[in-house]
Image: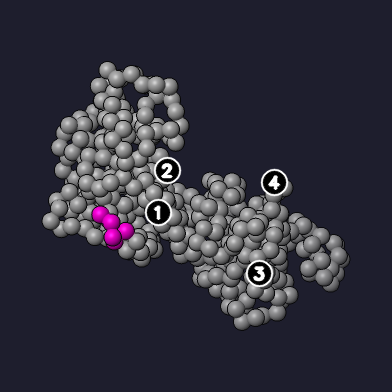
Amino acid sequence: MAHFAPAHPASALPPAGTEERLRAIAAARRHVMQGGADVPLPVESWIERSWRRCLGMGLDPRRNIEFDCVSPTQMRRVQEANHDLLDTAAPLLEQLGRAIANTRFFALLTDAQGVVLASSGHIDPSDLRAERITRVGVDLSEPAIGTSAISAALQERQPVWLHRGEHFFEGNAAYSCAGAPIFGPDGNCVGMVDVTGIDTHERPELRHLVLQTARRMESALVLQRPHALLLRLAWPGSVIGADGDALVALDSDGCVVAANDAARQMLPMLLGAAAGRLPIGDVLGVEVQVLFDAAARRRSAFEVPLWSGLCVQVLALCASQAPADRRRASDLAAGAPLKAVESALIRKAIDAARGNVAQAAQALGISRATLYRKLGRRPGGEH
């Protein structure tokens, strides 16, 4: 049985595309498949975890797999459940397909369970190996096809590159693939995007390409979510307004209803936050009305403090609204006097709080003194 040296970082693995790397993969594979002890191996740690999960499920690496599709009934449920993802991501998947048109790779979009929703790029109809994994409805989950970029990206929640013998089943050794998970506006994984080649040279740079595509899909999903205000965020010194911006969408009360993964990485308080329950004032050290004012005045990006002591650039933009918020949107779009809009919002908050000014101020993300000042009255006094 092969003996392996102490653990080393991924950067110290045999160089991609070399015979040394293929031999190292084969040796690591033999060690795990023969029941070898859990010792450091010359492959990415997530690959070994996937191999061992597959063995734990009783899968035989020598077995031929059929790449079965889910039932028509189940596929209808999958398409209904993933309508927003498919509708939003399809144009970006087509762009990805064009980007790899001069290679021997094609693109796939799956749901969070690994069921194929769509494909793009050059798919050789005469190659059964390509046809069987690009069919809409084919199950590419780990229990179905073992270790792959699709299953690994969904299991590990990170972008991956997988080459030939790193697949679990021997019959999949012709494939090379890169995959990245797609996170929805609530932070849950909703699917993944993949590029796969057959009998190709190793191209680990495709991991970056699929990651960028996944991030663009996440931003598109945020923009699709009904909201009153969109915040684009970037660290000071960065150019704001690019595809990589952190996006946070707010409702008319200033609560977070959607965010992309870049925003959750920048603002950890967004992790696990329920949609519509986290006031932006709990995240940014600024009154929520300042953000609405900036959008109404078409103010350029400005620096805003975080409660951590850091600061970020924020570009506030008015956006399409949910039906209940359309009146506020139309008021802003028509250039209604800002003071009147502001007063209406405050009155609405006070009414919702049944006259409790402190509670209304908290809901608006401002102090009670500021609320009184904006209404032009003193605490306990008259207008």
Give the mark, 1 or 4, whose residue is nearer the N terminus: 1
Q: Position of residue 296 (x, y in %)?
A: 65, 73
Q: Amino acid at mark 2?
A: Arg
Q: Position of residue 78 (x, y in %)?
A: 30, 54
Pair 2/1: label in front: 1
For label 3, the crowd category at 10 Å Cα-Cα, with few meaning under 14, some 14 to 19 and many 20 or more, is few
Compared with 1, 149 (above or below) is below
Q: Circle 4 — which element? A: loop
Whether the residues at callouts 1 and 4 have beta carbons within 8 Å, the answer is no
The residue at which mark 3 appears reads as 300
Give the mark, 2 or 3, whose residue is nearer the N terminus: 2
Which label sits on residue 116? Answer: none
| Closer-to-camera residue (9/367) | 9
The residue at which mark 4 appears reads as 308
Give the mark, 4 or 2, whose residue is nearer the N terminus: 2
The residue at which mark 1 appears reads as 209
For label 4, the crowd category at 10 Å Cα-Cα, with few meaning under 14, some 14 to 19 and many 20 or more, is few
Q: From mark 2 to mark 1, how far is it between C-alphas?
A: 16 Å
Pair 1/4: label in front: 1
Q: From mark 3 to mark 1, how far is it between C-alphas?
A: 30 Å
Q: Amino acid at mark 1?
A: Leu
Q: Amino acid at mark 4?
A: Ser
**Quadrant housing the C terminus:** bottom right
Which label sits on residue 157? Answer: 2
For label 1, the crowd category at 10 Å Cα-Cα, with few meaning under 14, some 14 to 19 and many 20 or more, is some
Give the mark, 2 or 1, whose residue is nearer the N terminus: 2
Q: From mark 4 to mark 2, how far is it between C-alphas?
A: 27 Å
Pair 3/1: label in front: 1
Whether the residues at callouts 4 and 3 have beta carbons within 8 Å, the answer is no
Q: Main secondary structure of the magenta part?
A: loop
Q: Which residues are magenta?
A: 100-104
